[in-house]
C-alpha cells in the first residue's frame, strides 16, 4: 500500500473528479505474468433476453 504523500504524482494520474471521498492510499500491483483462459473450457455467455427468461421466476418470487 502506498501513502499518497510519498508519491504525489501518482494521484495526478487518476481521474477522480466525481469521487466523493478523500483518497488516502493506493494499492499498486506489479503484474509479472498473466495467462488467458482457454476458450475450450469457458462456457458460452448468455444474451440479455436469455438471462431475462432465466430470471423471470425469481423476479415473480421476489415481487410476492
Image (tube, grey):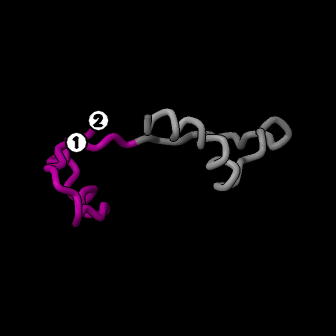
- Residue furthest to the front: 64
Tell me residue 55's x, y (percent).
59, 41
Vertically, is 63 above or below 50?
A: above
Q: Position of residue 25 (x, y in %)?
A: 22, 42
Q: Secondary structure at mark 1?
A: strand
Which numbered tag is attached to residue 40? none
Is 37 left, or right, of 19 in this rendering? Answer: right
Check the picture and name the quadrant holding the C terminus: top left
Q: Which numbered disc, 2 or 1, marks the residue that appears first in the sequence? A: 2
In percent of width and height, residue 48 lies at 64, 55
- Front-most of 47 and 16? 47
For disc 2, the neighbor class at 10 Å (few under 14, some 14 to 19, many from 20) is few
- Count of numbered labels shown in the rendering: 2
> Which residue sits at x=55%, y=35%?
58
Is residue 8 a member of the stretch shown in magenta?
Answer: yes
Residue sitting at x 47%, y 41%: 30
Q: Quadrant of residue 15?
A: bottom left
Left-right relation of 33 to 15:
right
Q: Is 38 situated above or below 49?
A: above
In the displayed structure, does residue 20 sit left or right of residue 56?
Answer: left
Measure how far apart labels 2 and 1 are at the Cα level: 7 Å
Q: Are marks 2 and 1 in contact (CB under 8 Å)?
A: yes
Q: Residues within 10 Å of mark 1 (few under 14, many from 20)?
A: few
Q: Kindly identify which numbered label has been placed on residue 25.
A: 1
Instruction: Identify which residue is drawn at 18% across, 48% down.
Output: 23
Residue at screen point 17% across, 44% down: 24
Instruction: Name the mark on residue 1.
Output: 2
Start-end of magenta stretch: 1-28
SS at mark 2 in the image: loop
Q: Is residue 59 left or right of residue 28?
A: right
Amino acid at each position: 500500500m502506498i501513502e499518497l504523500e510519498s508519491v504525489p504524482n501518482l494521484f495526478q494520474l487518476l481521474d477522480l473528479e466525481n469521487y466523493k471521498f478523500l483518497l488516502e492510499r493506493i494499492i499498486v500491483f506489479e503484474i509479472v505474468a498473466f495467462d488467458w483462459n482457454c476458450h475450450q473450457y469457458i462456457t458460452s455467455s448468455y444474451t440479455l433476453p436469455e438471462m431475462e427468461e432465466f430470471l423471470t421466476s425469481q423476479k415473480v418470487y421476489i415481487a410476492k
